[in-house]
Amino acid sequence: MIKEKTKKILQTLPKQVELVAAAKDRTSEEIGQTIESGVKIIGENYLKQAKLHYNSIGSRVKWHFIGHLQKNKVRKAVKIFDLIETLDSLKLAEVINKECKRINKVMPVLIEVNSASEAQKFGITPEEVIKFKEELDQLSYLKVCGLMTMGPFAKNPEEARPYFRQTKKVFDKLEDKYQDNHWRYLSMGMSSSYKIAVEEGANIVRIGTAIFGPREKK
Ligand SMILES: *Cc1c(COP(=O)(O)O)cnc(C)c1O
């Protein structure tokens, strides 16, 4: 099942769009199946699970961090991940910068945009993104590669469309402003909303349940 679902999704995505298999609470075996079917990037929300999977799967795929990163987990996270998609505060950025300096690694990151400006969500509001990017540019062990957004939680994925569209606008604005060739990723859309996100310009989609099936509560 996982294999067929993965292949179908890969076939329907335009070729400029990269698929991240969102692997929270899945087994290494399940992740292995999606890799056999062509997935090249695994998204992890929790460091503990990421370490487990990384130890069995290794660096034949890329690893994206897509959860909320706690500062006390950064030292371990920077060793594993190829891209941190959820940079949501300057404090966190400073810790990542410091830990990357220790191991002499430049960490690619995306700025998490709280596109619907929801109080309970992590991320930078659309109005603050430019200022935040300028602060990040002072940190030499970070490479800021674009934006990520969750969009609002809604039953109907169409409700996310205006927020995806707005995030794309901010993405384009920064592209024009900085002419920076690291600036290239716009990560938007999950199982229910990825088609809409792609229509609105996403070039990374993060898909869990549409690949692996419903998640069992653990
Ligand atoms: C779980 C998760 C996804 C995937 O969600 P699905 O609805 O299972 O596709 C995408 N992005 C983030 C940040 C997630 O935590």
Image (tube, rainbow, N blue to C red):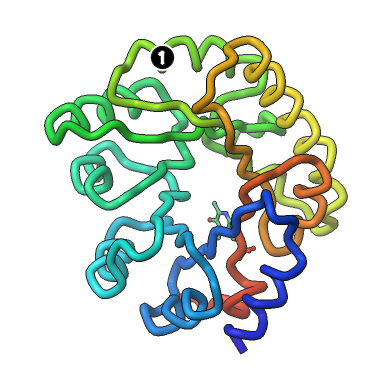
Left or right of 84 on screen, residue 120: right
Residue at 59% x, 84% y: name it. 3
Amino acid, disc 1 = Asp
Q: Position of residue 31 (x, y in %)?
A: 44, 76
Q: Residue at x 55, y 79 (%)?
A: 37
Assess disc 1: are there few (<14), some (14-19) or many (≥20) residues with their C-alpha within 10 Å of its C-alpha.
few
Give residue 118's position: percent from left, percent from top: 66, 34
* Ligand 1 lies under 8 Å from the Cβ of mark 1: no
Image quarter hosting the C terminus:
bottom left
Residue toward you, 213 or 171: 171
Residue at the (36%, 43%) spot, across then down: 69
The quadrant in which the N terminus is found is bottom right
> Residue at left 27%, top 52%?
80
Q: Is residue 156 left or right of residue 94?
A: right
What is the x, y in percent for residue 105? 23, 34
Asked if residue 128 is positioned above or below residue 39 in the image, the reply reads: above
Element marked by disc 1: loop
Left or right of 205 on screen, residue 66? left
Above or below — where is 154 with respect to 109? below
Residue marked by disc 1: 137
Q: Quadrant of residue 114?
A: top right
The residue closer to the viewer here, 204 or 94, is: 204
Quadrant field for ligand 1: bottom right
